[in-house]
Image (cartoon, grey):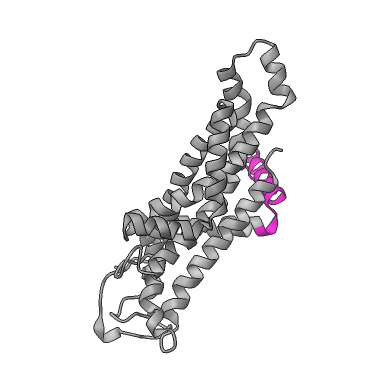
Amino acid sequence: MTLDLGRASRAWRARAWQVLGPGGVVSAAVVVLVLVAALWPQLLAPGDPTAVAPAEAYRPPGAGALLGTDASGRDVYTRVVHGAGQSLGVGALATAIGLTLGVVLGFGAALGPRWLDGLLGRVIEVLFSLPSLVLALLLVAVLGAGVGPSVISVGLATAPGYARILRARAQAVAQSAYVGAARLEGVSAPAAFVRHVLPNTVWPLVAVATLGIGQAIVWVSALSYLGLGALPPSPEWGAMLNAGRLHITSSWWLTVAPGLAITVTAAALTMLGRRLGAVAPS
């Protein structure tokens, strides 16, 4: 039994390396580390991210303060680790909102009546032609500032992209030979959708959604940096950037630390999403 488990483990690692490649494996490891920080931050940083110590303000990185301290003496490393949950959470939630709306619009346009396809198709194209971040800013202006409105705004702004991808994919699958053969054999439209159309359109969305989470983290952080999302003393990475921007020349670590966290996380998710997209069934 132990030998079989060892062989299975080695086979799994070999398969993962073959599918993902070196870059994908490294990206997956980074994503796992960020997930650990988001779900169990106390494992990596047992301190309190909001605890102030004025006497320790603006302490540079070094012993006792790995990434230095901020204007209130709060440990930057602890805040970056504890901020992973907020940054990753809002990115994932925004992606879920955009993906859900995109699925509804995409399937409605691809599989609905011709008039519905024409209507939704034009709406999707018009919204997709607008820069997503600009659209998010417009929605924030309507909904108001805050974490909730910024998440909803980014989610709504990304929905047209998901809908456009899904519409094209679902139409191609629905018009494929094997779906036509299934329909000639007497398979009902709902059954053909569940058996053939849905499975062959969901996997590409998994890869796109992985890319989308990294993109959403950057956008939500950008809104927080502009003061439209999370606000200090929240350890959310964009809010930390906003709080440290006035001290970038004297206390560079206040912006470098959260900036690196955003960049590395988004890059890892982007690379992982591309690798998943490369192995997606065509």
Start and end of the magenta stretch? Answer: 1-23
Rendering quarter of residue 107:
top right
Residue at 60 percent of width and 46 percent of height? 207
- Taking the image as shown, residue 52 lies to the left or right of residue 159, namely left
Residue 18 inside the magenta-drawn segment: yes
The location of residue 251, given as percent across then percent down, is 41, 85
Question: Picture quarter containing residue 149?
Answer: bottom left
**Residue 113's x, y, as percent?**
56, 25
What's the residue at 38%, 72% (across, down)?
A: 240
| Quadrant (top left, top right, bottom left, bottom right) of the N terminus | top right
Choose top left, top right, bottom left or bottom right for residue 90.
Answer: bottom left
Image side of residue 201 versus residue 59, left or right: right
Q: Position of residue 206 (x, y in %)?
A: 57, 43
The front one of 30 and 123 is: 123
Direction right: furthest residue? 177
Looking at the magenta stretch, what is its main secondary structure? helix
**Which residue is depicted at the point 45% across and 83% down?**
252
Residue 39 visible in image: no
Given residues 12 and 158, the one toward you in this image is: 158
The mark tally for this picture is 0
Q: Position of residue 231 (x, y in %)?
A: 31, 67
| Relative horizontal placement of residue 269, taking residue 172 as reference (left or right) | left
Could you tell me which quadrant the C terminus lies in?
A: top right
User: In terms of depth relative to the viewer, which is nearer, 78 or 85?
Assistant: 85
Outermost top residue: 186
Instruction: Residue lying at the far bottom in this picture: please name it.
Output: 250
Q: Is residue 4 above or below residue 227?
A: above
Q: Is residue 204 visible?
A: yes
